[in-house]
Image (cartoon, rainbow, N blue to C red):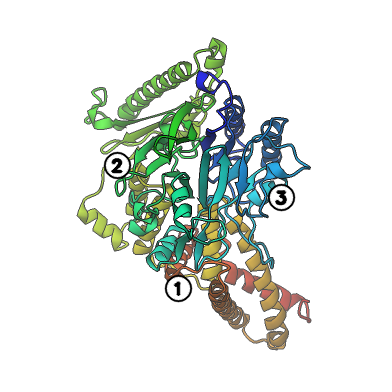
Amino acid sequence: MEDARFAAPAGPDTLRVLLATDNHLGFLEDDPVRGEDSFNTMEEILRIGREAHVDMVLLGGDLFHINKPSRNTMSKTVQLFRKYCLGSRDVELEVSGTFAHGERPNFEDENLAVDMPVFIIHGNHDDPTREGAQLEALSALDLLSDSGLVNYFGSVERLNNIEVKPLLIEKGLAKLKLYGLGWIRDERLHRLFAQDKVQFFTEPDGQPEQTAADLEAERTWFNMLVVHQNRDSKGRGAKNCFQESMIPEFMDFVMFGHEHECLVEPQAAIANDNILLCQPGSSVATSLIEGEAEDKHIGILEIALDRSELKPVCELTKIPLRSVRPFVMEELVLSTVDALEPDANEEDKLAVLEEVLEEKVGALVEEAKARYRERNPRARDKEVRKLLPLVRLRVEHTGFTPINLQRFAAKFVDKVANPNELISFFRKRRSDGAASRAAQGADQRAIEDRAAELAAEEDLSPQARINALVDEILATTANELRIIPEREFSSSIRDFVDKGGVRSIESYMDSLLQSQQELLLGQALETERDRVHNGEDVGELTEQIARGARKVAEQRNRAALQRERAEAAQGNVALDASDAGGQPARLARAASGASRGSRSNDSAADLGTRARSRAGAAPSAPS
């Protein structure tokens, strides 16, 4: 640890906390170049915490990149926490409150040797979910908590009435009330705040202070909230973010997870300048956007009591992360490049364009390595030469034909870590007339252009871009799911988009097709095989089976809606009021439109084909 202030433990009345968030362990774990990036930086964070003698580590959600981490990711995570969080140092904290599992922090377990406790909330990538018929929603963080490696808090028991209660953490005269609120869908959280169904309590038991002495003693506590939500409304809409008005007035410090741009230095809230806002940002770049290109940092927060005024004070020091793969991003407008002559023939323009882009990318590679040298002055020349940075060049190509990106990427396979995402072509925004034609569904190319425009909107989150693109698709195509149950299918789409469940849609479709085939073939063939053998039209039987499939889909939709309403009434799961005919249905239809010709849209025909085959080959229905 280079900062001399952290060379020794904090004083007996100073609480030292390491702040980090959005580690996304397991991101691109199968990539031979970038697969270890998230683990390398996580190890650096924990090593810094140990070298800086922090009293605790606070993580703001999205520890894992996908909701169900692989065994490889879980194994490496456990190894990291065991290596850096277990030891023989004394923990000088006194903690009371309720965690996800029990009321004792892990360092109080006599069977463990935790000497750097980690406190963590869940994010949208690792939030609790149910599997099969299980009643309790569990997160991958529950496994780490049950193993005694982390202290998981901030989960919500009832999503129709949220109660946020603090953990009381004391070290000498330093007193911290730590409030945690794990990820909840932004629209739902906004609605609950509007209905006054979110309550912040000042005591773990939910009872307010009763005496004047209690109220006076409350002034000595430092109130801190850690949340994992969209911080502002960058293109998301007012209901899709955690607004400053939602922060209780008695709060002193708010740490935001979910946002990946590093804004770790505290800023005063606009609505209340007594509240400090901190956004550490992600520790690994998961999107090639401008906000991820900034240098990554974590923070070390020190909390103490000002004895003269008897009120808490804090100081935050930002610590650079040196193991992060360098990432540079730049934009190039081809119409401003002198070497490109608009009147030249197409072949010559493409050849010159490729030379221009190759030269530009080469310069960006050198710039990335220079930034790495600056951040790591002790790095050896051999290490820098072998380094493969992340490079992203956005090219505005109005009036020019794009080059072959696959052939161009092959030139930089051994020079950058992301050759297949090296160049991003986009065009200027279309005129109102073009947008109108796209909205009327007259030009499929308009959808592709709109996708490129949305990709160029660096201020939009990936989820906001997806939602906007889905609206464009729905406005230009007429797609309707007739066999796939929309409500069930929409949840698998949300898992794919929000949680990185790469096989969630495929697994659901496999399950759905198998169940429908078995049900329909088992029932329809048994009653209709006599008609087939009597020479009646097999096509009519096929149509009957297709109608049966649609009927089953409608029944499953109704059953899913009833289950969601019943569970929401009990406070076990959330039901967004807009879901009834709203976004999930739109997402499902959009997914159907985007995957025309896939086996999911051919399921009725597939059933009919199997029906004809079996009806002609066997006199009895399948079991």
Q: Are marks 1 and 3 in contact (CB under 8 Å)?
A: no
Residue 146 shows which numbered tag? Answer: 3
Q: Residues within 10 Å of mark 2 (few under 14, many from 20)?
A: some
Q: Which residue in the protein does label 2 denote?
A: 427
Asked if residue 593 is positioned above or below residue 286 in the image, the reply reads: below
Amino acid on which disc 3 is placed: Asp
Label 2 to label 1: alpha-carbon separation: 37 Å
Left or right: 498 as drawn, with respect to 46: left
Instruction: Measuring from the top left, give residue 357's x and y in whole percent.
Output: 37, 26
Instruction: Measuring from the top left, give residue 377's x and y in whole percent.
Output: 49, 13
Could you tell me which secondary element the residue under label 2 belongs to?
Answer: loop
Front residue (pair 237, 31)? 237
Asked if residue 401 is positioned above or below residue 237 in the image, the reply reads: above
Q: Earlier in the sequence, mark 1 or mark 3?
A: 3
Q: Earlier in the sequence, mark 2 or mark 1?
A: 2
Label 2 to label 3: alpha-carbon separation: 51 Å
Amino acid on which disc 2 is placed: Arg
Q: Quadrant of the N terminus?
A: top right
Amino acid on which disc 1 is placed: Ala
* Residue 591 can be seen in this image: yes
Q: Which residue in the protein does label 1 denote?
A: 580
- Residue at (45, 63) in percent of width and height: 198
Asked if residue 542 is positioned above or below residue 82 in the image, the reply reads: below
Front residue (pair 316, 90)? 90
* Residue 597 can be seen in this image: no
| Image quadrant assignment for residue 515 | bottom right
Instruction: Measuring from the top left, give residue 383's x and y in whole percent.
Output: 56, 15
Label 1 to label 3: alpha-carbon separation: 37 Å
